[in-house]
Image (tube, helix red, strand yellow):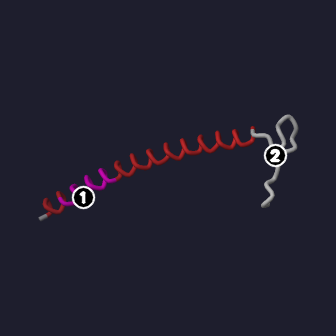
Amino acid sequence: MIDERLIEIETKLAYQEDLLESLNKLLIGQQDRIDMLETVCRRLLDRMKDIKEPGEGGGEQYEIPPHY
């Protein structure tokens, strides 16, 4: 009786360890994806800052369309 219960507990523990490892791998993948997306966002913000606004000199003047 005690041996059966011990085997059952060990089996559950093995499944829990496997689940934990799977979740850890998933979390690592998600963090890598987040890091990549943050890099892309930073690059886009830098590119947007480099675009000259109207009236900042050096660039052509943009006219506001008449429907504004």
Q: Residues within 10 Å of mark 1 (few under 14, many from 20)?
A: few
Q: Give the mark, 1 or 2, whose residue is nearer the N terminus.
A: 1
Disc nearest the viewer among 1 and 2: 2
- What's the magenta region? 8-19
CA separation in Å, label 1 and label 2: 67 Å
Element under disc 2: loop
Asked if marks 1 and 2 touch (Cβ < 8 Å), the reply is no
Q: Reply yes or no: does residue 59 show up in magenta.
A: no
Amino acid, disc 2: Tyr
Q: Residue at x 38, y 52 (%)?
A: 23
Which residue of the protein is positioned furthest toward the top in this rendering?
58
Q: Residue at x 75, y 40 (%)?
A: 51
Residue 67: x %, y % from top left: 78, 61
Q: Is residue 45 left or right of residue 61?
A: left
| Viewer-closest of 49 and 4 | 49
- Above or below for 19 versus 59: below
On-image quarter of the N terminus? bottom left
| Viewer-closest of 50 and 58 | 58
Q: Assign the magenta stretch its main secondary structure.
A: helix
Q: Reply yes or no: does residue 17 show up in magenta.
A: yes
**Displayed quadrant of residue 29:** top left
Which residue is the site of mark 2?
Answer: 62
Amino acid, disc 1: Lys
Which residue is the site of mark 1?
Answer: 12
Element under disc 1: helix
On-image quarter of the C terminus? bottom right
